[in-house]
Image (cartoon, rainbow, N blue to C red):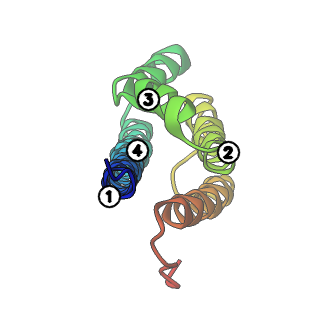
Amino acid sequence: MEWLPLLSTLMGAAIGIAATLIADRNKWRREVARQALEVRRAVYTEYASALKDAGEEIRAVALGDHRSDAARDTAVREAFRATGLYTASEQLWLVGPPLVVEAGNEAFHSLRRMRDAYARGVVVGSAEDRAFIQRRRTAMAEMRRRMREDLGVGPLGIE
């Protein structure tokens, strides 16, 4: 019996099976990476939106009339909590890479400083308010830049 043709056939089958397994593994890795990117994109969008909503809400409350300092403080803090920002922040902490989480945390704290200022009576449109807004804009721009970089999207160049 001639063994060479049999060995050649077996070797060809083994190479074919190995190539298929490698191709499937690479395909699986690409799919996992694509899904992770989509999860981060959704979390980044939710977080940036929650920051924006919270800023608008606390500003609207700060513009309103309040019977007392305590009522203003309570209203501003409740407006901040009601936006879902805390939940979105936790999601960012769970899936974001360190540089994005760091920038997102800075944006969160810049907004929280603004919230605390409104709660203690800082007037919307005042010089102190404008300084808080500028710090918040800078933090938000850096956060967005890092998010876009992580997602593989080029810089906007307009912030």
Using a 10 Å C-alpha cutoff, classify the residue at mark 3 as few (fewer than 14 neighbours), some (14 to 19) or many (20 or more).
Answer: many
Earlier-in-chain disc, 1 versus 4: 1
129 shown above or below 118:
below
Q: Are marks 3 and 1 in contact (CB under 8 Å)?
A: no
On the image, numbered disc 3 is attached to which residue? 80
Q: How far apart are marks 3 and 1 (CA)?
A: 76 Å
Q: Which amino acid does label 3 sit on?
A: Phe
Q: Nearer the viewer, residue 133 or 71?
A: 133
**Residue named by callout 4:** 36
Say which of marks 2 and 1 sits in front. 1
The residue carrying mark 1 is: 5
Amino acid type at mark 1: Pro
Residue neighbourhood size for the residue with mark 2, other residues' Cα within 10 Å, grouped as few (<14), some (14–19), many (≥20): some
Residue drawn 53% across the image and 29% down it: 94
Marks 3 and 1: which is nearer the front?
Answer: 1
Label 4 element class: helix
